[in-house]
Amino acid sequence: MTVYLIRRFFQIIVVLFLSTAVIYTLFALAPNPLDELRQSTDPKAQASNADIARLSKQLGLDKPWFLQYPVWLAGDTWLDSIGYGQFVGDRMGILRGDWGTSWKYQKNKPVLGLIKDRLPATLWLMVSSTLISLMIGIPLGVFSAVRQYSFFDYFFTSFSFIGISIPAFWFGLLIISASLVAKNKGWFYFPAGDVLAIRDYKVPLLGMVEAGSFLDRVMHLVMPVTVLSLLNLAGWSRFMRASMLEVLSQDYVRTARAKGVRERIVIYKHAFRNALIPLITLVVFAIPGVFGGAILTERVFNYKGLGFLFISALNLNDYPLAMAFLLISSILLVLATLLADILYTFVDPRIRLD
């Protein structure tokens, strides 16, 4: 195990290095704020050469193209040692925790500070929806496989196909409309936007809800969590059903039944554990999504999490913020693959990483 982890550690470093190179190259090829100033035809928006030079130095765009990526990684405090003292600054680079500042979203505010502010809202949303999907989807998938071709199996299969086919944004708009109808009827009401309310509000059957309270947060989570949970539930439960059916047809399962082992033990001890192996791969890759949030769902519900922040950064061409988001997602992705390999050994003792 130790040798394997060391080998994977070096592989992760190589993968992340290549990922950062690709991410930086793509954003470097896109127009930046200086290009917008130079191409502007509005006399009020045009900047002098001195202003452009000042902004270029502030944004780190004054350096030659072959130095910009190393500076983004390792800062610019070391440039004097290689003969580029005219470009020395106070940037430390992402390797030393300096991820830059926002260009437009919130000018000059540290990128990591913006991400830290939005992270709790995204964790509330994604962890809740993921746990609900797993707690409901896995048992439904197992039960559907055990009761293959029953009425429940046909009903569940139809539900899964519908859930997989429905776009997240359309489903979100649908339940927002349903919530507004219920509010007008005086039945019930769930807030359709933001993370927390700015003032107290009244909900049928519950009475007044204090803005910023735990109940207020839960009320704002109900609709986006419902959308994400049902969509994930449809896919994961269907995947669990297929994996379980494959395991139930194996020889060792038939042998256990022939020996008179109780059906419950055959299903949950022999079949279910092995059926989890393919599902682990699917679930661990949801880890980057827990950080990144649900971009479409957050946008539809105006839920200001990290997904909403990423879209806003792209719309504003705030590249330091967008690059930080993609880089953290890449780190979580490679760590998720390592976690999946380790979990395989716990689910199936026959698997050895050595």
Image (cartoon, rainbow, N blue to C red):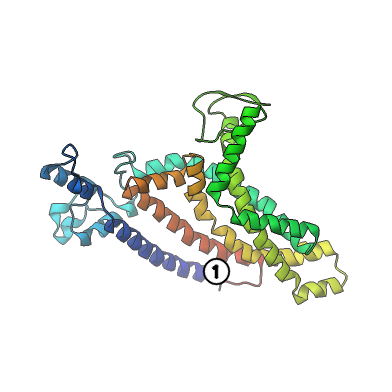
Judged left or right of residue 126, residue 188 is right
Judging depth in this view, the residue of 271 and 241 nearest the camera is 241
Picture coordinates of residue 280 (x, y %)?
Answer: 61, 62
Is residue 143 in view? no
- Snapshot quadrant of residue 179: top right
Judging depth in this view, the residue of 36 and 209 nearest the camera is 36
Callout 1 amino acid: Met
Picture coordinates of residue 24 (x, y %)?
Answer: 31, 58
Residue at x 16% of width, y 56% of height: 80
Residue at x 36% of width, y 49% of height: 314
Judged from this view, the residue extending furthest toward the right is 260
**Disc 1 target residue:** 1
Whether 8 is drawn above or below 160: the answer is below
Judging depth in this view, the residue of 129 and 262 nearest the camera is 129
Picture coordinates of residue 25 (x, y %)?
Answer: 30, 61
Is residue 169 in view? yes
The quarter of the rendered structure image containing the C terminus is bottom right
Whether 112 is drawn above or below 140: the answer is above
Judged left or right of residue 105, residue 140 is right
Whether 120 is drawn above or below 204: the answer is below
Q: Residues within 10 Å of mark 1 (few under 14, many from 20)?
A: few
- SS at circle 1: loop
